[in-house]
Amino acid sequence: MASSDKPEISERKVEEKEHKEDEKGEEQGGFMGKVKDFIHDVGEKIEETIGFGKPDADVTGIHIPSINLEKAEIVVDVLIKNPNPIPIPLIDINYLIESDGRNLVSGLIPDAGTIHAHGSETVKIPVTLIYDDIKNTYSEIKPGSIIPYRVKVDLIVDVPVFGRLTLPLEKTGEIPMPYKPDVDLEKIKFERFSFEETVAILHLKLENMNDFDLGVNALDYEVWLCEVSIGGAEISESAKIEKNGISYIDVPITFRPKDFGSALWDMIRGKGTGYTIKGHINVDTPFGAMKLPISKEGGTTRLKKNKEDGGDDDDDDED
């Protein structure tokens, strides 16, 4: 064989070797693909046979169990349904409350519990809105206003076959920024006047500074005239104060005028009498019950006696 034929034999051997390696690679690739397909098929068969599935969740309600001038306690109810034959852990709960893109409050609840097999659980997410924090951060939010909000909740669960899943939820609503009513003691009308004991009616003017109605159902108060306490009381009184509106409440009181000393004569002469009033009103609102403070210091009121006690009794009640 001529020496010139040897390179052809060598090249043919290299090509055969490369061809065999390619076939081997294809066989290995095909084998791994078959393994992956087999595992996938087994997973699907297990899922079909045992019944694994993704859990379902929904925000079923938002409650405000407590609200006052300082803060609002909010509870978000989330119903989670587990279709799987085994319990699944609720790993984390991320929550956010925002208003028009402004972050009001956010937080994380770790290790939030377990959802029973083929069962459902209502998970309660407690959230506290501190009004001072909101007002200090967003000065355009005014006391007495109603602001829209959006609750965003991410539930992170661990489900066999599927692995770790995030279930995003949202719900919208409104919440108030309550403001205390303004109070004035417009006049004091004597029902029975004597130096030892006087029975009188306090004519209170209440102005609602909020963008929502107030249904007054109880009132407690203490009153000072000429810097002398004439007492106070707790009464049940029904009155509706419409949003940004005014209402009047008459409350009874008994006191001893002789305790006022020389200031008594100014009161009898009908001169303006300085007063202070402090207390609370219990009200119903569209957002739940509230107990709001009322107070007025440095006010001036007038005293009126009945005709039987020497007064003119022309009430001139221009309510």
Image: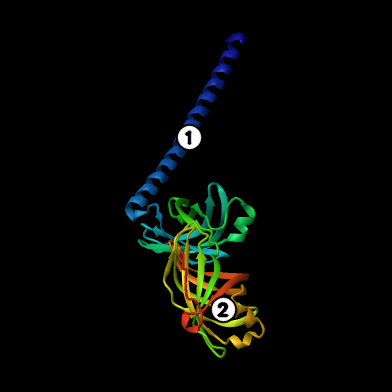
Residue at 57%, 49% in the rendered image? 102
Horizontal placement of 85 versus 206: left or right? left
Residue at image mark 2? 222
Give the Cα separation between the discs numbered 2 and 1: 89 Å
**Left or right: where 298 falls relative to 24:** right
**Where is 265 relative to 211, above or below?**
below
Of residues 261 and 155, the one drawn nearer to the viewer in this rendering: 261
Look at 56% across and 78% down and name the residue there.
222
Residue 131 pos. (x, y %): 58, 60
What element does badge 1 sit on? helix
- Image x and y of residue 220, in percent: 51, 77
Which residue of the protein is positioned furthest toward the bottom in this rendering? 196
Q: Total label count? A: 2
Front residue of 296/117: it is 296
What percent of the width, then of the height, locates residue 267? 60, 79
Badge 2, how many Cα within 10 Å: few under 14, some, many 20+? some
Report the front residue among 160 and 69: 69
At horizontal 58% and vertical 74% (from top left) the residue drawn is 277
Q: Badge 1, how many Cα within 10 Å: few under 14, some, many 20+?
A: few
Q: Which is more toward the observer, 121 or 200?
A: 200
Residue matched to label 1: 29
Q: Position of residue 23 (x, y in %)?
A: 48, 29
Between disc 2 and disc 1, whose residue precedes?
1
304 lies left or right of 276: left
Disc 2 marks a residue whose amino acid type is Glu
